[in-house]
Amino acid sequence: MSNDDTHGAEGAGADPYADFRRELAEFARSACPAEIRAVVAAGQKVTKREYLGWQQILTARGWGAPSWPTEHGGTGWDIMQRLIFEETMAEADCPPLYHHGLGHIGPVIIRFGTPEQKARFLPRILDGSDWWCQGYSEPGSGSDLASLSTSARLDGDEYVINGQKIWTSHAHEANMIYMLVRTSKEAKKQDGISLILVPMDTPGITVRPIRSIDGWHHLNEVFFDEVRVRADNLIGEVGKGWTCAKFLLERERLPPANVARLELVRRQVTRVVEEAARAAAGKRDFSSLRYRLLLAEADVKGARVLLANATDDLKNQRPLGVQPSVIKLMCSDVAQRLTTIALDAVGPDAAHRFLVDEGEGEPGATWVQNYLFTRARTIAGGTSEVQRNVVANELLGA
């Protein structure tokens, strides 16, 4: 459906997006395979298999890149349509879109890439041929990203990369990495940083897993030892990679998927609590868990209102102020509270069990791992401490 098609009912005073919502919902129910929806509905770890399977279905429908312009294979949807898309897909238990390619490096290439780079990389992001990871954080350069030291020196028509990246999600299954490297040393540490795209099968790259507390394998450290990459894989101007990084971070400031997925988790946890209550009838009192669920539900509704207000501001080109930080804080907090409720519901029977990375595991153990996984929500994507400082600086001038 085109952008213009969503406005047919506007003259009648109806929701101008009603037909759009209906089309999305019907497609999600009919096109998303039951086995993929079952993984999402159960709160299990979504793997490359589910991400890629759904991505290919959406791309065939023309909906593979909701935030991209039509000239690059995107939908050309406005911000409200993208919000509705995320909500509708979450309501139907469809997987989220894989963010590294479609949401991160794809838009950066569209904004800063050459015509040759766009032709070479964008179609492969869209159809899932290339699977991306992000090489930003380094040991000692996390929140202070500009202090990174991984180097890239120009040698003829190639850059030679040496250094290390850490906390690299999905590096073990990615075939491409977009990474920040230092191409020169300048007085201002943000200068001299460049953004370059590197095939993960290049000689000299070593990926080592980082096993996190949840038991799932999603984090890695990546080592670069004299890794040679063609010079025309550098995006934008040499030494101006910080501009690309800021552009990417700005796009992450208001992610509608986070709030939509929060409502999905609330529904999942409600189901877990009710199933546990039925199984333990007469043995445990679940009234306190139900009360905590009600409080969490109220905050989920609050987050949706905040996102709707911020979306309206974006649509009307008004400044967002601290709204993205407030939404990030709320989503992180509520996600942790919801998975804590689920853990308290299944804990007596499942707390000592862990699922395997692949295949079937113990019933209820999924929520032990989800509980542990969401401990990182207050760190990833901007720590809660940083977000509170942003709010304090804006409101109090601190």
Image (tube, rainbow, N blue to C red):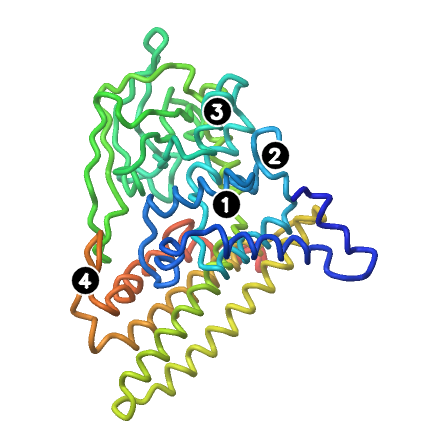
Instruction: Residue at 77%, 51% (x, y): give it.
Output: 8
- Nearer to me, 172 or 228: 172
Mark 4 vs mark 1: in front? 4
Mark 4 and mark 1 lie on one chain; the one further toward the N terminus is 1
Q: Position of residue 241 (x, y in %)?
A: 46, 27
Q: Which element is circle 2 on?
A: loop
- Most extreme residue toward the front is 30
Q: Is residue 230 visible?
A: yes
Mark 2 and mark 3 lie on one chain; the one further toward the N terminus is 2
Write down the residue under mark 3. 240
Q: Amino acid at mark 2?
A: Pro
Write down the residue under mark 1. 252
Mark 4 and mark 3 lie on one chain; the one further toward the N terminus is 3
Q: Is residue 392 visible?
A: no
Write down the residue under mark 2. 69
Crowdedness of circle 2 by 10 Å Cα count: few (<14), some, many (20+)? Answer: some
